[in-house]
Image (tube, helix red, strand yellow):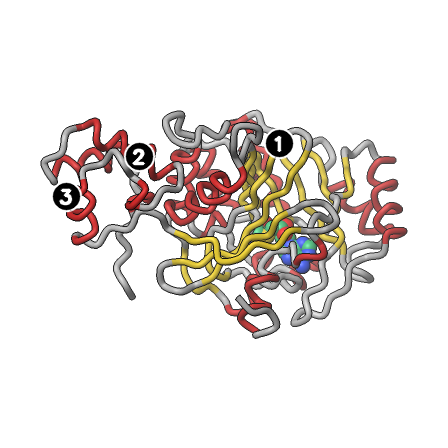
């Protein structure tokens, strides 16, 4: 593997140390950091000495971690899907959703995924590799650059809901969370960041203990362990009870309401009985449930529930006093779901 020496991986302290080792004054690190967070490549860094740029290049450093290879704009709702390439040729994807209150980017944390959920395109090849902090940050930096100008705000919200399991890449994700909310960097409000996990309970607890507080989103997708084990292999390791304990701990430490994601699969987890069972599971928790119509993934073959079943499910949850919404399916015409676009490119169904 090619050695990755990515400047966007470095926080201000690390950049200062690197530039000091080249005999450069402190303010150069500040300048470089600003350029990197604006998405600049070396040749755009006009106020940096040419010989310093040459030294960095010949030491094998790269400025930006990713390149936008292609973008697809939804004709339905303006959602933009991005296909990115990494320095080693791997592909990842992301989405920018434009809402009235701001622009939300969905970022990937791994190439592929080890979790192999039965409905998801990301886990089809297993885990290829983790993304570094700078490769995760690079997605935000690149999309922010493309979408911000004098009249547009750029990226305001982040969800770690793209390909990969963020808590299976714990250290890099934590470093990313710190860097992306750095006020000298992109300065994204910590309150505007959500992390979605299939439920790695010990890491949920660790995240709270380590002082991080993204909105915790749990991919639950089933109201009991037997059903969950059928669609999510991780359920063999952690029970729903383990998850409830972990999120209670997380809520007590961070004060942030928990979100549960429930992707609705026709004839599997969308019955009236499932809704009643789910209401009992979340009883007493400060939480919200998002019902998501399943996106069809060819290789997985599972169908999404129809609208009638989804709204019936919602009504039952509401009758138990549960806070619940049906998530608008954004970008469904552009392979908006996790891992779908990369899969199409790999299969040769989509050219780049
Ligand atoms: N690994 C993390 C984050 C990635 S997936 C997690 O499990 O939460 C983001 C969300 O999309 C998860 O809730 C995941 O279960 C869901 N998802 C994956 N494939 C989907 C599909 N085909 N249709 C609908 N939701 C899907």
For residue 33, the mark is 2
Residue occupying the point 56% across, 45% down: 106
Between circles 3 and 1, the one closer to the viewer is 3
Q: Is 272 displayed left or right of 154 in the figure? A: right
- From the image, which quarter does the N terminus lie in? bottom left
Mark 3 sits on what residue?
A: 51
Q: Is mark 3 within 8 Å of ligand 1?
A: no
Mark 2 is surrounded, within 10 Å at the Cα level, by few (under 14), some (14 to 19) or many (20 or more) other residues, namely many
- Furthest residue in direction left, as rendered: 23
- If you read the primary sequence from the N terminus, does the residue marked by circle 3 or circle 1 appear first? 3
CA separation in Å, label 2 and label 1: 25 Å
The answer to whether one can see residue 239 in this image is no
Mark 1 sits on what residue?
A: 102
Query: Marks 1 and 2: in contact by CB < 8 Å?
Result: no
Q: Is 94 displayed left or right of 324 in the figure? A: left
Question: Dot 1: what SS?
Answer: strand
Residue occupying the point 71% across, 57% down: 333
Please state which of residues 17 and 164 is positioned toward the viewer in this rendering: 17
Asked if residue 234 is positioned above or below residue 154 in the image, the reply reads: below
For residue 149, the mark is none
Mark 1 is surrounded, within 10 Å at the Cα level, by few (under 14), some (14 to 19) or many (20 or more) other residues, namely some
Residue 39, percent from left and from top: 39, 41
Residue 153, percent from left and from top: 55, 30
Between circles 3 and 2, the one closer to the viewer is 3
- If you read the primary sequence from the N terminus, does the residue marked by circle 2 or circle 1 appear first? 2
Residue occupying the point 43% across, 32% down: 186
């Amino acid at each position: 593997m090619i050695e990755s020496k990515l400047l966007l991986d470095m926080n201000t302290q690390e950049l200062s140390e690197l530039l000091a080792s080249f005999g450069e004054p402190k303010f150069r690190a500040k300048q470089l950091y600003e350029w990197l967070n604006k998405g600049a490549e070396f040749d755009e860094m006009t106020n940096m000495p040419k010989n310093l740029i040459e030294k960095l290049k010949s030491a094998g450093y790269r400025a930006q971690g990713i390149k936008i290879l292609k973008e697809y704009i939804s004709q339905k709702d303006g959602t933009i899907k991005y296909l990115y390439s990494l320095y080693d040729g791997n592909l990842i994807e992301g989405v920018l959703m434009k809402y009235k209150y701001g622009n939300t980017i969905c970022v990937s944390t791994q190439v592929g995924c080890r979790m192999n959920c039965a409905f998801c395109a990301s886990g089809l090849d297993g885990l290829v590799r983790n993304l570094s902090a700078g490769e995760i940050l690079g997605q935000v930096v690149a999309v922010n650059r493309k979408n911000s100008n004098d009249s547009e705000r750029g990226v305001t919200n982040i969800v770690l809901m793209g390909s990969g399991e963020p808590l299976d890449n714990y250290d890099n994700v934590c470093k990313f969370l710190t860097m992306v909310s750095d006020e000298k960097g992109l300065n994204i409000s910590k309150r505007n960041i959500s992390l979605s996990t299939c439920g790695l309970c010990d890491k949920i607890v660790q995240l709270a203990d380590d002082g991080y507080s993204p909105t915790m989103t749990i991919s639950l997708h089933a109201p009991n362990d037997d059903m969950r084990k059928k669609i999510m292999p991780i359920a063999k390791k952690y029970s729903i009870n383990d998850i409830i304990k972990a999120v209670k701990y997380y809520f007590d430490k961070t004060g942030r309401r928990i979100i549960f994601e429930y992707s609705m699969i026709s004839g599997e987890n969308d019955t009236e009985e499932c809704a009643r069972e789910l209401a009992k599971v979340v009883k007493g928790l400060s939480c919200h449930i998002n019902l998501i119509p399943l996106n069809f993934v060819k290789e997985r073959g599972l169908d999404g529930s129809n609208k009638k079943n989804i709204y019936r499910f919602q009504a039952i949850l509401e009758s138990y006093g549960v806070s619940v919404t049906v998530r608008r399916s954004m970008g469904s015409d552009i392979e908006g779901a996790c891992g779908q676009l990369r899969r199409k490119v790999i299969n040769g169904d989509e050219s780049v």
